[in-house]
Image (spheres, grey):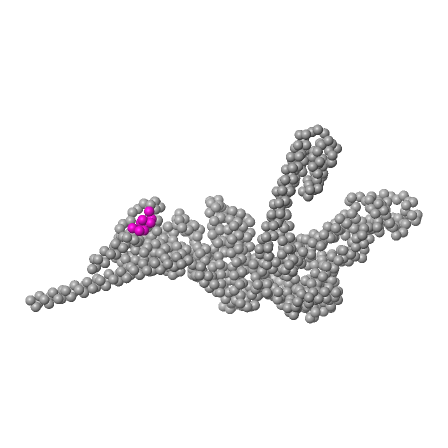
Amino acid sequence: MLCSVNMHRRHTTLREKGRRQATRGPAYMFNEKGTSLTAEEERFLDSAEYGNIPVVRKMLEESKTLNFNCVDYMGQNALQLAVGNEHLEVTELLLKKENLARVGDALLLAISKGYVRIVEAILNHPAFAQGQRLTLSPLEQELRDDDFYAYDEDGTRFSHDITPIILAAHCQEYEIVHILLMKGARIERPHDYFCKCNECIEKQRKDSFSHSRSRMNAYKGLASAAYLSLSSEDPVLTALELSNELARLANIETEFKNDYRKLSMQCKDFVVGVLDLCRDTEEVEAILNGDVTVQPWSENHRPSLSRIKLAIKYEVKKFVAHPNCQQQLLTMWYENLSGLRQQSMAVKFLAVFGVSIGLPFLAIAYWIAPCSKLGRTLRSPFMKFVAHAVSFTIFLGLLVVNASDRFEGVKLLPNETAMDHPKQIFRVKTTQFSWTEMLIMKWVLGMIWSECKEIWEEGPREYVMHLWNLLDFGMLSIFVASFTARFMAFLKASEAQHYVDLYVQDEDLNNVTLPPQVAYFTYARSRWLPSDPQIISEGLYAIAVVLSFSRIAYILPANESFGPLQISLGRTVKDIFKFMVIFIMVFLAFMIGMFNLYSYYLGAKYNPAFTTVEESFKTLFWSIFGLSEVISVVLKYDHKFIENIGYVLYGVYNVTMVVVLLNMLIAMINNSYQEIEEDADVEWKFARAKLWLSYFDEGRTLPAPFNLVPSPKSFYYLIMRIKMCLIKLCKSKAKNCENDLEMGMLNSKLRKVRFESSIQNSDFSVKNVYNKPTRYQKIMKRLIKRYVLKAQVDRENDEVNEGELKEIKQDISSLRYELLEEKSQATGELASLIQQLSDKFGKSLNKDI
């Protein structure tokens, strides 16, 4: 019976071996060594692959000729085969052997398959005792004289720059990442792309592509949710900064642009996922404000919202538009006005109308009592927004009123003059500032002061990053230039009037011959020079008025209906700027070509088109809108060759511009609009949050021009800042004197005592910091636990049943071998017992005989 059991096992092994070799086919070519395995080694590898624990144990313990590091046709040893088929017991048996090869390959294989228990067993191997093996990649361990990563010496399965922690992060194995982090493994952040250190230069010189791939693999590990969750003390901040870094690299390393963008979006999704797991206001505030112990709240006890500001800067739109974030922003928006939030639109409109009527009185009340209940109400973001909107609306109304006297046309024609008295210079009357213009100047000064405060608070670099700030700067600069030119014209006219008052005795200037520089200011508009300051002032003023009315688009995101339209308009402007590059290239080509063709025929054409550069520009530009005629290319002479070339070039230009480029621009605009419409809610909430955030900061409560008058609070803050500066200055001087005194001390014992006490105090404070986690750290720990559990549950639900079936088959196979081993042992014992009984029975028979 024992022989039959052994024969059955042998036939089973040979049958499985035959199936495996039939599946492998001619793959023996992969084995470069070309060495053949002995029968014992083949049986050993088969047993390790199929989880035959008894055979593996017996061969490891009894066989003296067995090479347990032998490899199959693919270069895999028994450890790799056991790990690849998730045979934990076989793996543990093999790890007990000394001089075991390819332990690192087995670890990477176990990590890639997500076998947590096998990873733990391998990490308990003596090779990982020092921890250096976990931080070095296979490429970095080439100098070692061992075969720790012998299988992947040619990068068969994993890249040479892959470390265990990077691979675990790639595979999103939370448990394995946690185990490796506890062992001291870390992912080193790659150097800056423009780094010029010796290491980076050498890697770039040796293999630039491999260097770029290693950077990509490192960033994939850093951007994985598993590594972000478990390695960082502030995962939200780390993910936000990493997303911005990856987005920047996408524009630098264009060959990996899609990969970097995908990783950047992965970091943003992680932040949104953590925010989505918040269950109360405390947790939401912790994510939106960060660690308040590092960044305290503002003077009016308003949260800093540092994370939201960072998300807006890095354009993490889903994070800002998340309901949890929007609810918190909405609560702060109606600060000190909690009852107004639930009111209808009619009540809110009445509140806005009341602020519009009483804005001057509210400003006076705030000047007198800025810390009163009314002052706190005016400092709320909603009231600040309403006050600034009302002020700007009044400013636009003044611009309209300033032009109202010319709505029905001017009474004075360009070739006419009019004076209040015969001795008055005409230009003195035309350059005087009206009361509306004086009010406009006050508003402009107030807005300039507000912009100066914003530049002081944010810094010039941050100020320039916002396009609306550039629009404000341009608008105010043009207003200042316009009023300056107007004032210069007024000064010149006043000087001419002063000359007339001093030296002209005649009461009628028409009867007097004046010097040319004085007589010029008596001329009608038709005789003014093109460079006259008043003409320049009027042109600049018109541009400033257009920019002023376009500034209304800044407040449109506050409304759900107009917000997406404003966003679409902004995106359209960007598309137009992109289109202008191709447009200018084509336009210049045809403009110069047509000018070269017709520049010799000045006066020999039916119209002056294309005879000068200016006429060529005008003709081609207005032909886009169908305002040019075909006769523009016709000559009076019989030069048909030139005419035919003109017809062809003019026709090709119209087809290229009207049919191709303009339709391409329309398609680009339509595509941008569709993208915004598909995600209109997120785009609008993100734009609205940017608008709201500009009113959350402390200061700039009163709008222009009321901000020109300093309030008592401003004087108080000024005195407090001067006081703080003086205190810091005195402390720095005292500290310098103390340092000088200590440097001159000869008694080293006293310094030693002070040093030791300071070290003890610092150690005590550090221990307190680390032993007592902050409120923010506790909240983040809770949220990360939820995130990890949710990720694990989602992964279990998404796993394919095929893997589970394969695992069950492998367990059944291992169990079968164990049962066969137990059966063989039981059969052997039974045979020995039968033999003993037969011997005893035979002896008893012999005695009886």
Quadrant of the frame with the C terminus: bottom left
Residue at image location 71% in from the left, 54% down from the top = 548
Q: Single out the residue that lies furthest toward the top.
A: 638
Give the image location of residue 429, x and y in percent: 84, 51
Relative vertical location of residue 86 with respect to residue 504 in this rendering, above or below: below
Give the image location of residue 497, x and y in percent: 86, 49
Give the image location of residue 795, x and y in percent: 45, 60
User: Which one is in front, 4 or 153?
Assistant: 4
Quadrant of the frame with the N terminus: bottom left
From the viewer's perspective, tell me whether residue 767 is left or right of residue 155. right
Residue at image location 82% in from the left, 50% down from the top = 410
* Residue 174 appears in view: no
Q: How many labels does the image show?
A: 0
Q: Main secondary structure of the magenta part?
A: helix
Residue at image location 33% in from the left, 45% down from the top = 26
User: Which one is in front, 436 or 643?
Assistant: 643
Q: Residue 201 in magenta?
A: no
Give the image location of residue 329, x and y in percent: 61, 64
Which residues lie in the magenta part? Answer: 18-25
Question: Residue 13, located in which quarter of the rendered image?
Answer: bottom left
Question: Residue 654, located in which quarter of the rendered image?
Answer: top right
* Residue 399 appears in view: yes
